[in-house]
Image (cartoon, coloured by chain):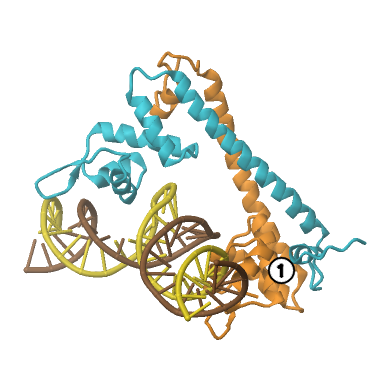
Chain colours: A cyan, B orange, C brown, D yellow
DNA sequence: ATAAACCTTCCCTGCACGGGAAGGTCAAGG
DNA sequence: CCTTGACCTTCCCGTGCAGGGAAGGTTTAT
């Protein structure tokens, strides 16, 4: 299996496959006589695993960890769960931060006329006009 | 005002101030005889504006746009509002994506025993075991 | 024979900076 | 007067996660 076919079957671009190999996320592919990379079905399974983990926004570092747990038949599920929970916490923090920004922006946008006049509470707030009316 | 003092007063690192100048977010600072950058109070106001916009997660590109609107006395507030609304939409999309991931991860984590045994629905899901029990 | 569709490596781009090297400058103190 | 340390300067590298494209070799089909 050449890289193009693997890319097609996995949905991961050839560029990205080479990148994953370069950072050790995929084992170095064997090469055919012409220097082309040759992949096995196990690489396809690994790539799909990586993709699903990435879809859940795990970092490539976490993915590396998840892969090693996946390949270790003696892993304790507690470790996998702990990794997932840490990730959930990061996501929660991220969501909370975004929601706080969203509230502020929404309030500002509602208070802005949005017409041809230049007055705008959005710019005034960014400029730091602390008007205590 | 040297860059160190400006950094202290604005809360933006000297590194970042030089970077902002290099990408045109701040006007090129004038230089004193020794080559040191010399800043004015207007630069401090600009930096604070940038910081507040960054706190609301506007990209530097958006900040550049906001700055030009801020400096334009004839700006229509509609343009500022539109920019803000586009940003709110991006944030909403981001939040929705994160919440979707969070739901999946939370479900998986709840279904994982989290003990010394290796069985783990998290890894099974990532591996793509489509078991239809 | 030639075109097209592969493949290879290499380096550049983006975002928004931070780190650190190598070197010039300035103020205070011994 | 000289040293020390706190400034400042430019320069290039690293981060995370790839995408873009150049320059070139290979294979397949027509």
Compared with residue A50, is residue A132 higher up or lower down, i.e. above or below?
Answer: below
Compared with residue D7, is residue D1 higher up or lower down, i.e. above or below?
Answer: below
Q: Position of residue D7 (x, y in %)?
A: 56, 69
Residue furthest to the right in view is: A133
Q: Circle 1 is placed at which residue position?
A: B79
Classify residue A85 by image quadrant.
top right
Query: What residue is drawn where x is 11% and y is 50%?
Result: A34
Q: Position of residue A123 (x, y in %)?
A: 75, 66
**In this image, D6 relative to B84: left or right?**
left
Compared with residue B50, is residue B132 higher up or lower down, i.e. above or below?
Answer: above
Compared with residue A83, is residue B84 higher up or lower down, i.e. above or below?
Answer: below
Q: Position of residue B97 (x, y in %)?
A: 58, 41
Query: What residue is drawn where x is 70% and y is 76%?
Result: B42
Rate crowding at label 1 as few (under 14), some (14 to 19) or many (20 or more) other CA atoms within 10 Å: some
For the N terminus of chain A, which image quadrant?
top left
Q: Nearer the viewer, residue D21 or A103?
A: A103
Q: Nearer the viewer, residue B63 or B91?
A: B63
The chain containing the residue under callout 1 comes to B
Q: Nearer the viewer, residue A125 or B97?
A: A125
Q: Position of residue B110 (x, y in %)?
A: 56, 20
Tag 1 secondary structure: helix
For the C terminus of chain A, which image quadrant?
bottom right
Classify residue B6 by image quadrant.
bottom right
Query: What residue is drawn where x is 26% and y is 47%?
Result: A4
């Amino acid at each position: 299996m050449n890289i193009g076919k693997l890319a097609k079957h996995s949905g991961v671009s050839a560029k990205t496959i080479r990148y994953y190999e370069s950072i050790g996320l995929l084992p170095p592919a064997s090469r055919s006589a012409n220097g082309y990379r040759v992949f096995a079905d196990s690489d396809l399974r690994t790539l799909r695993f990586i993709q699903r983990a990435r879809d859940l926004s795990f970092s490539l570092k976490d993915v590396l960890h998840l892969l090693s747990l996946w390949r270790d038949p003696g892993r304790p599920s507690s470790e996998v769960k702990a990794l997932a929970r840490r990730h959930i916490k990061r996501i929660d923090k991220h969501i909370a931060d975004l929601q706080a920004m969203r509230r502020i922006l929404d309030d500002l946008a509602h208070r802005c006329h949005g017409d041809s006049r230049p007055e705008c509470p959005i710019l005034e707030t960014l400029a730091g006009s602390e008007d205590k009316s």
